[in-house]
Structure formats: structure tokens, C-alpha cells
Image (spheres, grey):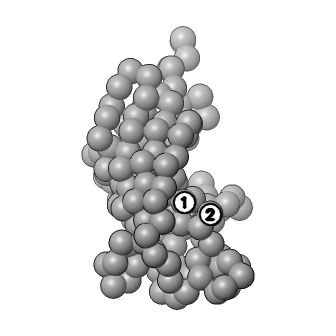
Amino acid sequence: MTPQEFAQRLNRLYAGTMMQDMEMLHAGEGRARGRVAFKPQLRQLTGLFHAGVIMGLADTTATAAAMWEVNPDGEFRPELFPLTIQVSTNLIRNTGGGALTADAELVHRGKSTIVADVRVTDDQSRLIAKTTVTLLVPKAPAR
């Protein structure tokens, strides 16, 4: 399965979840790229993207990269889902239109944790947020 096919499989899984407004463009080989287009329901009271949306996009993209690492065949198995255990985000700026793109890169692949660095940018390639996500590596169940 290619990283693009893996991303499309994730997009189908996102239907009906908090991630349904996000689109995974690429997920595999230690990286992932996700996108979310601005919609009125994703804004905070001043009309800009809600910080939770920005952080959610970063976390979802990091998780997509980690999912490939722990289960590259792309069959969703809850017991192989890498759970986020820590998120640290610096919000640099914000926007009230266009789309945000998150680029995640795995920087640590350990036996018990995976760490991803994520850059969220706007349509003008301006840095919106810098996030580090730590995920728990699931233990494969005995068969």
C-alpha cells in the first residue's frame, strides 16, 4: 500500500468523527501530511481558526504517521492504534480563511513511544503552529 492509499483509507475512517473535516494527503514512511479547510464551525469567537482545530490537525497528522509505523497494512485494528499521551503546541499566528496544512515527521521510534514533530502552515506557507506529539506504541496482541 502506498502512503497515498493509506491516507485515503484513513479519510474513509474519519467519516462521522471529529476528524471528518480533515483530509489526510499522505501517510507513511515516517511522514504524514494533513489538511483542513476553513469553515465557520471551525472558528473561535473572533473568526479565526479555533486553537483546538489547529492542535487537532497536528495530533491527527502525527497519529497518521505513527499508524503506518505500527500497522502499515492499513487495516484498522483498534488494538494497534497508537494513542497520544502528550501534545505540546506553540501557536505562532492564526488565520480566518483558506486552509491549514500539517506536516508531521517521526523523530523517535522507540519500543514504547513514538515522537513526531509537526509544522502547521497556512496557504501562504506561514508558520501557524509547531507541535510535538508523543504516542504510546501499542503492544501487538498474542495470537
- Point 47% across, 28% down: residue: 137
Q: Residue at x 36, y 72 (%)?
A: 127
Circle 2: residue type: Gly
When asked about the image quadrant of residue 67, the answer is top left
- Does 135 appear above or below 51? above
Snapshot quadrant of residue 103? bottom left
Quadrant containing the C terminus is top right
Of the residues shown, which amino acid type is indicated by label 1? Met
State yes or no: discs 1 and 2 in contact (Cβ < 8 Å).
yes
Rendering coords of residue 60 (x, y %):
52, 54
CA–CA distance in space, label 1 to label 2: 5 Å
Left or right, 47 with reference to 143: right
Question: Picture coordinates of residue 12 (x, y %)?
Answer: 57, 59
* Residue named by callout 2: 52
Residue located beneath label 1 in the image? 55
Q: Is residue 121 above or below residue 8?
A: below
Residue 117, which numbered label?
none
Out of 139 and 9, give the one closest to the viewer: 139
Q: What element does badge 1 sit on?
A: helix
Point out residue 123 in the picture as x, y percentages from the top left corner: 38, 83
* Residue 64 visible from this viewpoint: no
- Taking the spot 61% from the left edge, 34% from the top edge, the residue there is 78
* Local secondary structure at mark 2: helix
